[in-house]
């Protein structure tokens, strides 16, 4: 899990904003908000 989120964070920081869908990012942030408390410690950090 943490590797996947780390890769996506890298892409967000190194690509133009226009390359990303705002609705996709919003849905991913919603997923984090809803699942972070039950995730393994490594994923939380």
Image (cartoon, grey):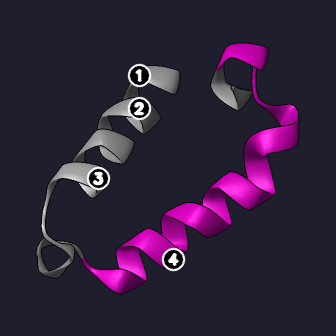
Mark 3 in CB contact with mark 1 (< 8 angstroms): no
Query: How many numbered discs sit on the rendered protein?
Result: 4
- The residue under label 1 is 3
Report x, y in % for residue 15: 14, 59
Q: Residue 17: percent from the left, percent from the top? A: 21, 75
Expressed as whole percent of the image width and height from the top left, the position of residue 33 reads 75, 59
Tag in front: 2 or 4? 2
- Left or right of 6 in this view: 11: left
Label for residue 6?
A: 2
Callout 2 touching callout 4 (CB < 8 Å): no
- Identify which residue, 7 or 16, lies in the foreground: 16
Per the model, the C-alpha gap separating discs 3 and 1 is 15 Å
Q: Earlier in the sequence, mark 1 or mark 4?
A: 1
Label at residue 26:
4
Of the two numbered discs 3 and 4 in the rendering, the one whose residue sits closer to the viewer = 3
Asked if 28 appears above or below 41 in the picture, the reply is below
Quarter of the picture holding the C terminus: top right
Q: Residue furthest right?
A: 37
Which range is magenta?
A: 21-42
How crowded pointer 4 is (Cα within 10 Å; few <14, some 14-19, many 20+) is rated as few
Q: Residue at x 29, y 52 (%)?
A: 13
Query: Cβ–Cβ below 8 Å for labels 2 and 1?
Result: yes
């Amino acid at each position: 899990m943490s590797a996947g989120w780390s890769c996506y964070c890298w892409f967000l920081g190194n690509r133009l904003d226009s390359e990303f869908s705002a609705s996709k990012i919003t849905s991913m942030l919603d997923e984090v908000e809803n699942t972070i408390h039950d995730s393994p410690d490594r994923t939380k950090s």
